Amino acid sequence: MVRAIVMLETEPAAGGTGRRALRTRRKKLTEAMQRSVEAAADDIAEVLEKFGGRRLEHRLDALGSLAVETTPAGIKALSECPRVRAILEDQSISLISK
């Protein structure tokens, strides 16, 4: 099995560009982005089920990414989904000792 982070296409969020506008609309913009990628979550679930994979998180994050675990063939199938922007290897990060 392969662990990966799937980055989904998101619709651009409309909103102000000023600091105050960003602060007051942040929650609404985040919710709008999550709604825009929820439709893709069904496609992802279908591919994962077909290849014996699973989601490692129940919710998409604010950036529209999702951690999954599936077979190499499942990763290839996910890469062919139109709403998938990128797939990144999910790997541990550790400090380099001196």
Image (tube, helix red, strand yellow):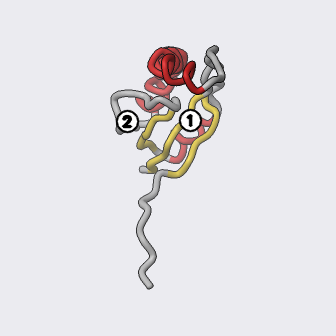
Dot 2, how many residues are within 10 Å of its Cα: few (below 14), some (14-19), or many (20+)?
some
**Marks 2 and 1 in Cβ contact (< 8 Å):** no
Q: Nearer the viewer, mark 2 or mark 1?
A: 1
Q: For this rendering, which residue is in front, 49 or 66? A: 66
Compare marks 2 and 1 and give the one earlier in the sequence. Answer: 1
Q: Can you tell which quarter of the image residue 94 is in?
A: bottom left
Q: Is residue 36 above or below residue 95?
A: above
Question: Which numbered dot is residue 51?
Answer: none
Residue under label 2, please give it: 54
Name the kind of residue labelled 2 in the image.
Arg
Give x and y (percent) for residue 3.
44, 48
Residue under label 1, please give it: 7
Give x and y (percent) for residue 48.
44, 32
Q: Find numbered disc 1 in the image and state the secondary structure of the residue it sits on.
A: strand
Give x and y (percent) for residue 51.
45, 36
Q: For this rendering, which residue is in front, 1 or 61? A: 61
- Label 2 and label 1: CA atoms lie apart by 16 Å
